[in-house]
Image: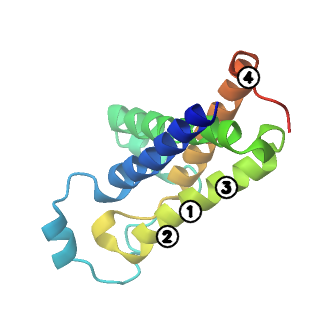
Amino acid sequence: MKLMKGILWCAFILYLACLSKIILIKHLPISIILQNLDVRLNLNQSNFVPFATITDYFALGYTWISIENIIGNIIIFVPLGLLLPILIGKFRKDIIALLLVSFIISFIFELVQLLFPIFGSFDVDDLLLNILGALIGYFAFRLSRKNLNLKPE
């Protein structure tokens, strides 16, 4: 069981690295990032109004982009909601703690995008969708918990 836990911790760390690549670095070469890594508030492209980006995409006819954005933001946080309860017993019953950690991790990514425009722009919709993804992952954990033979904590 210790080996499996070690493998899962490695998978979790790899997941966080991949999450950083997907959300922040995207397809940008490191040299471009380093040349354009200036700190300034990216307020012009930021969205602080819940569901504004999603509704704008649909209203402008960007249906596929909107669906891709919604599904992508949900899916990338499902592993967080699944792995945290497996690795840390506190999260098995405390859904509020899991949602809080999910919020904090997602908020850090959004804050980096707000402060460093090269990484993207802050979008509260992304934050909400990421938390929904973690919640879906948590419910997937709850459904499969019996098969994982984990002791409740």
Residue 101: which disc? Answer: 3
**Which residue was labeled with disc 4?**
145
Whether residue 47 appears in this view of the structure is no
Looking at the image, do the residues carrying marks 2 and 1 touch, with CB atoms under 8 Å apart? yes
Q: Earlier in the sequence, mark 4 or mark 2?
A: 2
- Quarter of the image that includes the N terminus: top right
Looking at the image, do the residues carrying marks 2 and 3 touch, with CB atoms under 8 Å apart? no
SS class, disc 3: helix
Label 4 or label 2, whichever lies nearer to me, is 4
In percent of width and height, residue 7 lies at 51, 37
SS class, disc 4: helix
Between 137 and 131, the one nearer to me in the picture: 137
**Which residue was labeled with disc 2?**
111
Name the amino acid type tagged 4.
Arg
Q: Earlier in the sequence, mark 4 or mark 1?
A: 1
Measure how far apart labels 4 and 2 are at the Cα level. Answer: 34 Å
**Which residue was labeled with disc 1?**
107
In percent of width and height, residue 112 lies at 43, 70
